[in-house]
Image (cartoon, grey):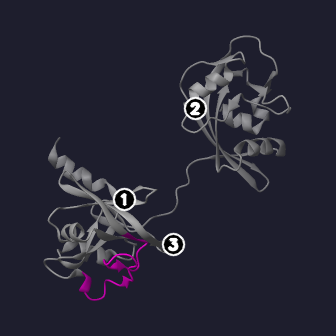
Amino acid sequence: MNRRIAEKAQRYFTTGISLVTSSGPHGQNVMAAEWTMQISYKPMLIAVFIHEGSATFENIKKTKEFGINVSSEGQTMAVNIAGGYSRREIDKLKVKGFFEFLSSRKIKSPMIAGCIVNVECKLVTMKKLGDHTMVVGRAVTISYDETKKPLIYHSGRYFRIGSIIVPFRKVVNVDTVTFNWFSIQAKNKFVLKCVGLIIKSNNKILVLKQTKNTPYLTIPFTVPKRGTKYSKILDFYLKKSGLSTINDTPILKRLTLKNKKKIQRINFVLFEGRIKSNIKNHTWKFSKLNPLLHALSN
């Protein structure tokens, strides 16, 4: 690998910055760390990557505890101080006017006020990886400030979070019967995930009765269990229907069904299909006359 290119390319990774606090042989200290992340939910584990031999590393190794303080957008100077000097050079936390503190509850390391997240951690493990050591801590207390926004670091400069980018999802206005049908299938899930079959002929689309007890007609589809292979579940569902898939190329349709003020989000993974033999309880509908069928077939 070309090292010169790599050194330039690595500046284009985008991270947040945390203020890692500790207390130990080098006294109370703070360092700035880009490489900080949560790596487990239960238990909540936080990893930070630190150079061996640094004051922070030696403090944590001795005391088996540290603080993670996720910087907010108003803390650029605090980050500059924490990242620009060693504890061996100055006592960074005493620099006038840049650090305010919160009371620590379960560790002796200081905690920094004004951050978006504050986590008190007990050391779990240390592991050397490349030129840094991964330090993993278990969160013993955590707090956050929803009024703050995180500080972003990219190409050697600081940035703010901009406007929200909403993932594309086509809004489809449907009648009450259609909305209620899919709402029942969703069982209060935020997003209903379906796998289905699209068979088209002369501007029409094949639809089936979904159950014997309802007259509702829509494309052949089923709701797969999480973690199951969609194409395999669809093949099993279609096994006795006289229908089959043409190929294994999935088509994704992200829809929001809307009925008056109610909405239901649905993700359809669709496969193109064909009729293998005569089947019952099916019909053909003009897709243009049905908003949902039109959205699924185009």
Q: Residues within 10 Å of mark 2 (few under 14, many from 20)?
A: some
Cβ atoms under marks 1 and 3 closer than 8 Å: no
Residue type pointed to by label 3: Glu
Residue 98, position in %: x, y?
31, 84
Nearest the viewer among 53 and 84 is: 53
Badge 1 or badge 3: first in the primary sequence: 1
Compute the Cα span from label 2 to label 1: 34 Å
Q: Residues within 10 Å of mark 3 (few under 14, many from 20)?
A: few
Compute the Cα span from label 3 to label 2: 38 Å
- Which residue is at 81% across, 17% downward? 280
Q: What span is in magenta? A: 93-120
Residue highlighted by disc 1 = 37
Examine the residues drawn in magenta and state their main secondary structure.
loop
Residue highlighted by disc 2 = 251
Query: Which quadrant holds residue 211?
Result: top right
Q: Which mark is residue 146?
A: 3
Which quadrant of the rendered structure holds the N terminus?
A: top left
Residue type pointed to by label 1: Met
